[in-house]
Image (tube, rainbow, N blue to C red):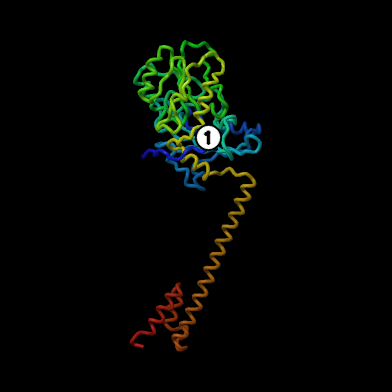
Amino acid sequence: MAKNSPSSTTAPDTAWIGRGRHLGPEPERDVRRNLIALKAAGVIDDFLDLDPVEAARSTDLFPRDGSADPGSSARRVFEARWRVTGNVTVRAQLTTYEPESRPVGNDSEVAWVLAAEAERAWEASWPSPATMFWPDSDHVAWDHDKVPGVRLRRTNHLPKDDGELRRLLRDCTRQSWFIHVVVHEAMTPDTRGQRPVTAFLPPSLKHRVIEHRATPEQALIADFAMKRELGVGLPRGGAVVLPPAPQGPGYDPERFTVGDVFLDGTEPTALLQKITDFASLPRPLPDGAEQALARLRQGWHLLTPDEELVHARAMVTQYAEALKAMTASCDLYREAAESAHAALAEATSGHSTPGTPALAAAEQDTSPLNTLTKTLAFFRRPDR
């Protein structure tokens, strides 16, 4: 199957998108339980649980070939609606897919794509759309990136091998939909320092960022690999936000590098500001994200009562217009038939009767124009 081509569309500031993998058993059950609990608690207004075939009946934007994740097929579509900052409505769609490939011995892995959009520009302080569908629990392994071995909500130590490290950097910047940050541990941190710095991020940004750690002895190898693969360096004891590939406008390695990060459990204010600034940059939609947003906008099913009323009125108007067009067509046909009969009577000067072959043929023809043409031709024949 052909891969999705890179999108030239800039991600809208109203949207939140994510793609990952769930490695635990019964992922759709985890989503259902979370949605039911959040609706009962009044956190979300409503939700829908749809079969992909059912979702596709109203739109062709849910192909079962899993276009958002080439080589996979859709399993389930979930929609949820909630409000933030008073009455700002957020609509979100989570689709689960069979993965492109599944590790040997793991029959429960599924891929997922989540697209959410608000009625105005997205704010990092709003609740994370991920935890509207997935339980925010360490016991539910929904937070694996498409890149193997990389997860949200925890620190990911870089590989020791130089080749594996460089391959990981390439995959994270080219395949992942998330923001990636590399932090160098100047010294081995204690329990407080092992806590991910991403935990200090605002809710909506927390689940858009993946944190990598380089151990103290990896300072040189990590810095060399990053300069060679990405053109950015890693300061000893510092951190850097990795550029996406292709690199978007506004990215400057110095702007998104921090010289010192103290891993002592305190809030790394400077690094958090760099991540926030990077997240606000205009960025092209990654492969498959444009399709996910199109499905959210054009294939939406969870209507509010007011929207259902508007939809019903639109359907009534559509049917009325169709009926009016049919009636007008019938009137035009009747007028054409009457004109044909009048022309026939005039052409025969009253000598032909309804039982003549010419008139019988005219009555059997469904086209008034054809009737007139054939009848006049009959009376022009030389043998008459």
Quarter of the image with the N terminus in it: top left
Q: Residue at x 61, y 33 (%)?
A: 36
Q: Nearer the viewer, residue 209 or 153?
A: 209
Q: Position of residue 96 (x, y in %)?
A: 49, 35
Judging by the rendered image, the residue that carries numbered circle 1 is 16
Q: Residue at x 59, y 57 (%)?
A: 317
Query: Dot 1 surroundings within 10 Å: few (below 14), some, or many (20 or more)?
Result: many
Give residue 83's quadrant in the image: top right
Q: Nearer the viewer, residue 144 or 127?
A: 127
Q: Residue at x 62, y 38 (%)?
A: 88
128 sits to left or right of 1: right
Determine whether the residue tagged by mark 1 lies in a helix, strand or loop.
Answer: strand
Amino acid carrying label 1: it is: Trp
Q: Nearer the viewer, residue 181 or 190?
A: 181
Give residue 220's quadrant in the image: top left
Answer above or below: position of 160 versus 47: above
Q: Residue at x 36, y 17 (%)?
A: 161
